[in-house]
Amino acid sequence: QVQLVESGGGLVQPGGSLRLSCAASGTTFSIYTMAWHRQAPGKQRELVASITPYGYTNYADSVKGRFTISRDYAKNTVYLEMNSLKAEDTAVYYCARGSSRYGPWDYWGQGTQVTVSS
C-alpha cells in the first residue's frame, strides 16, 4: 500500500523559511516523479514543483527562485525548501506521486498546513 506522509509545515513570518518533507512507503520511489501541490482556501489545488527520477525539475512561476524541490533516494523522501515566504504562500501543501513532471498524479499525502503571517 502506497503511503505518502508530509511533515514540516507550520507558522512562519513573511520572509522566513520552511522545509517540507514527504516520506514515501509501499512504492518503488526511484521510478516515479514526485511533486508538491498546494491549495489555499477558496482556490483550486495547484502544482508547485515536481522532480523526475532523473532529477529534472519543474516549478510554478510564482515560486521560481524561492522554492527548491529535491529527493533523497536512500530515505525515500522528497523535500520542498521554501525561502522568502509570502502571505500568498499560505496553503495546505500536498505531496503526490506521478508519472511525469506534469502528472497525472495517482497517490496523495494527507497534507501539511503552511501559514505565512506576522
Image: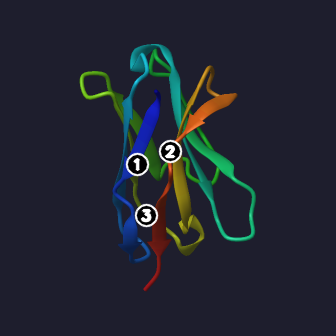
Mark 2 nearby-residue class (10 Å; few <14, some 14–19, many ≥20): some
Label 3 vs 1, first from the N-terminus = 1
Instruction: Kindly check if marks 3 and 1 are in contact, taking CB atoms under 8 A apart as contact.
Output: no
Q: Which residue is mark 1?
A: 6
Q: What distance separates the C-alpha of mark 2 from that of mark 3?
A: 25 Å
Q: Is residue 86 above or below residue 7?
A: below
Q: Is residue 106 above or below residue 46?
A: above
Task: Label 3, secondary structure: give it.
Answer: loop
Check disc 2 and give the amino acid type. Gly
Where residue 41 appears, x then y in whole percent?
67, 70
Task: Label 1, secondary structure: give it.
Answer: strand
Image depth: mark 2 or mark 3 in front: 2
Mark 3 nearby-residue class (10 Å; few <14, some 14–19, many ≥20): some
Mark 1 nearby-residue class (10 Å; few <14, some 14–19, many ≥20): many
Q: Which residue is mark 2?
A: 109
In screen coordinates, is 2 left or right of 44?
Answer: left
Task: Label 2, secondary structure: give it.
Answer: loop
Q: What distance separates the C-alpha of mark 3 from that of mark 1?
A: 21 Å
Residue 103 in sight: no
Check disc 3 and give the amino acid type. Ser
What residue is at 52 percent from the left and 55 percent from the top?
A: 93
What residue is at 47 percent from the left and 13 percent from the top?
A: 31
Check disc 1 and give the amino acid type. Glu
Label 2 vs 1, first from the N-terminus = 1
Instruction: Kindly check if marks 2 and 3 are in contact, taking CB atoms under 8 A apart as contact.
Output: no
Residue 84, disc: 3
Image depth: mark 3 or mark 1 in front: 1
In screen coordinates, is 92 left or right of 29?
Answer: right
Asked whether 60 or 93 is in front, the reply is 93
Q: Which quarter of the rendering shows the C terminus?
A: bottom left
